[in-house]
């Protein structure tokens, strides 16, 4: 079980890294430097990564018995 948790955490950290690498685009959008159309694909991808991170966190909690 610990090995499975370790693998899930590595996947989660990889996804978090991807979010960090696209932060500059989110900031540019928030500051009005790029349009909604320019940001739409990145926004959707970032949400997919966050959804996956949330699912991984739930899996880890379940494996640890934290339900």
Image (cartoon, grey):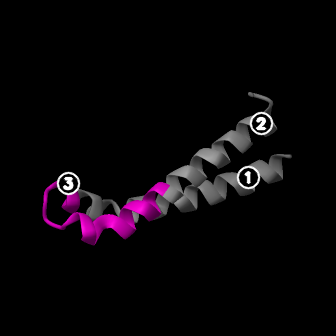
Expressed as whole percent of the image width and height from the top left, the position of residue 15 reads 54, 60
Q: Which badge, 1 or 2, comes first in the chain's sequence?
A: 1
Marks 3 and 2 sit apart, C-alpha to C-alpha, by 36 Å
Give residue 30's mark: 3
Q: Is residue 6 above or below residue 37?
A: above
Q: Residue furthest left?
A: 32
Q: Majority secondary structure of the magenta segment?
A: helix
Please state the extent of the stretch shown in magenta in the rendering.
28-47
SS under mark 1: helix
At 75% across and 28% down in the image, what residue appears?
67
Question: How dense is the environment of label 1, judged by Cα within 10 Å: few (below 14), some, or many (20 and up)?
Answer: few
For discs 1 and 2, the disc positioned in front in the rendered view = 2
Q: Nearer the viewer, mark 1 or mark 3?
A: 3
**How many marks overall?**
3
Mark number displayed over residue 62: 2
Q: Residue 43 sits in which quadrant?
A: bottom left
Q: Which is more N-terminal, label 3 or label 1?
A: 1
Q: Secondary structure at mark 2?
A: helix
* Callout in the foreground (3, 2): 3
- Residue 6: which disc? 1
The mark that comes first in sequence, 3 or 2, is 3
């Amino acid at each position: 079980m610990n090995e499975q948790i370790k693998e899930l955490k590595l996947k989660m950290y990889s996804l978090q890294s991807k979010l960090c690498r696209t932060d500059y685009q989110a900031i540019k959008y928030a500051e009005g430097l790029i349009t909604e159309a320019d940001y739409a694909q990145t926004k959707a991808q970032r949400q997919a990564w966050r959804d996956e991170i949330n699912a991984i966190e739930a899996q880890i909690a379940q494996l640890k018995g934290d339900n």
